Amino acid sequence: MLVLLIVAACGRSAEEPGGVRVTFSGSAVGAEAEVLRAQLDAFSAQNPDVRVEIFATPDAADQRHQLYVQWLNARTSDPDILQLDVIWTPEFAAAGWILPLHSFRPDTDAFFPAAIRANTWRETLFALPWFVDVGMLYWRTDLVAEPPATYAALAEAAAAATTAEVPYGFVWQGARYEGLVVGFLEHLHAFGGSVLDARGRVVLDSEVATRALNFMRDAIHGRGMVPEDALTWREEQTRFAFQNGRAVFMRNWPYAYPLMQDATASAVAGRFQVAPLPAGPGGGNASVLGGAQLALNAHSEEPEAAWRVVEYLTGPEQMLERARAVGQYPARRDVYDHPELSAALELDASLARRIIESAVPRPVSPVYPQLSSILQVWLHRALTGQREPAAALRTAAEEIRALLERVELYPDTARPRGGVDG
Amino acid sequence: MAEPGMADPAMPTRAERRERRTAWLLVLPAVGSIVLVALFPLVWTFWESLHLHDLRMPWRGRPFVGLDHYVELTTDVRFWASVGHTGLFVAVTVVAELALGVVLALGLNEMRRGRGLARVLVLLPWAIPTAVAALIWRFMFEGESGVANELLVSVGLLDQPVIWFVGAKTAWVPAMLADVWKTTPFVTLLLLAGLQNIPDLLYEAARMDGAGAWRRFREITLPLLWPALLVALLFRMLDALRVFDLIYVLTGGGPGTATEPVSLLAFDTMLQSLRFGYGAAMSMTVFVAAFLVALVFIRVLGRRGTRGLA
């Protein structure tokens, strides 16, 4: 059976008229599949010498990651183009699985700087941002006069606006998963701290980091601004709390915006707005960046043709097209000046742009997933009262240092290694 | 050399040889499948545990590292904590299940009417898939206004709602309750079978000799139920040692890692962190622990068995 399929596949491709075949893998279900197919058809109409095939991959990030690892580790030449999660680029770059893009001379200034930084490993760009996802502060326009600019102002406004009907001041994602790390990073940057410094050294056990984590803990156990329950919540539980009118403020991604404007399901339709996340003492306002990137397989047989597809898909018109079709936020800044974008996103595009401009990437490291799982455990221990924040961060920092040393990525022990140069 | 026709007692005759060959052929499917499904994965896992195999860092290759992973285990705080959690879980749930199981089995054994219906009702939790049961318990204990909180506050056992899954100690409550609820029926059934093997004659004789109910239970029921109890204990311990799905769904090992058993940590190491070698070393330790428990029980059971015959 399998043999028959392979023979049939080979036969078919041999019969096809000239031109090169390029394969694309990424999200290919539902509306996303439709818009992608339409975009690739439009590309082929303009470029008859290139045929693009879609490789379906699972939509769950972990599963897609696993599949990519298997393919790339086996040095297959397909798929030529890979849709990557924002935190995978350094990992794939360090493994030598994706091509550096500088030789194609992409116009990096047109994209949001945080999105470019997230895709840069050892000063080289390895993937081009496709669409972005960003943390936002949702606030109730009927309970609060204006969005708070700082976390202190947020705490004050939350305390003033909470009532028996609106018991929660602020809700965020506190379960032990990636979302908790994202929320912590946003607090951490607002307070002026970071996990890794510019040289890649671990600076998580700093005083500012402790202050940021103390603020999060006190928000639950001190002020009672954040419900204890939030320590078991992911995105959807926070959305339900806010959507049912039980919270004054919420930290969430843009996906919640159109859903909560639907008056048939949402009690707060027309009574909320979004704003950049607050700043803290000693830092600016910072939202963590998510989203998808496009990269080229290092073993691709048609890198030139594949690059043309990537360039096309990451062009301004195509980004606008995806915003219209599936509400994804363009990764190019100038698209936000387009008059149609606000309608497509159902949100004022200049406000969206302002929020994304303040975005920061997560620590750019090939071992980010392991780094994150260390943080998940220690942050959750600190926030559930099992460990003092300072002690938790100290141990987390030690474990992250040990991790980076084990994989020979710690700056003091690091030597140029493998990957693309080797 | 044996003369033709003069069978040397040490040398098997052709018929005997053929019989032996047939015997081997007959057990081959059984032996083969044991090798395939039990021995092969075991040897493979052990081999894997001696190698560095990290799918997140494929550039490091897959070198042989000897016992490095086992050495790393000895100082891995999270691993030892998970061993402690597993021990606690086994001790509490197995004791509770056996105690409850004895009570329920005695009750069911005494019932004269409606026995069939009672048995079906008792068995119901056992029939529910673990993941589904875990979701039900999670739902009951979730949040400030979950079923459990409402109930406990209304009957006055709690002054105010508890956020069960956020406390390092309180998260154990739903996890252990769910396990006891789910597997006590299994223990009950095993013990009920044991009880029904005790001849009524013995009780009648004891009653004639003037033995009271407690005396009859201690002198007749308990000793004769002992083999069934040991079997139930063995099965439950082996199951509880490997506890995974219930905790995975119910608490996810949290808060932090406060309810994380060894098998969940091994799963996390293998399939989330993709450290296959290290995860394999953890799995091997779970296997060795379970194997030792089984070995001890089989010896004890074997001794009991022969003494019972004598």
Image: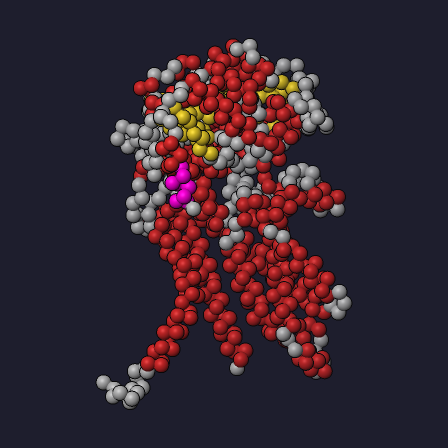
Left or right: B151 as drawn, with respect to A7: right
| Dominant SS in magenta | helix
Q: Residue at x 46, y 35 (%)?
A: A57
Q: Position of residue A390 (x, y in %)?
A: 47, 32
Residue sticking out furthest to the right? B113
- Looking at the rendered structure, the number of numbered marks drawn on it comes to 0
Residue B113 can be seen in this image: yes
Q: Position of residue A127 (x, y in %)?
A: 39, 24
Viewer-proximal residue among A181 and A216: A181
Viewer-proximal residue among A240 and A163: A240
Q: Residue at x 67, y 64 (%)?
A: B103
**Which region of the structure is painted magenta?**
A2-9
Membership of A242 in magenta stretch: no
Does residue A387 sit above or below B11 in this rendering?
Answer: above
Quarter of the figure with residue B28:
bottom left
Q: Residue at x 41, y 47 (%)?
A: B279
Quarter of the figure with residue A93:
top left
Does residue A288 sit above or below B44 in this rendering?
Answer: above
- Say which quadrant the N terminus of chain B sits in: bottom left
Q: How is the image coloured?
A: secondary structure
Left or right: B64 as drawn, with respect to B127: left
Residue A398 can be seen in this image: no
Left or right: A223 as drawn, with respect to A35: right
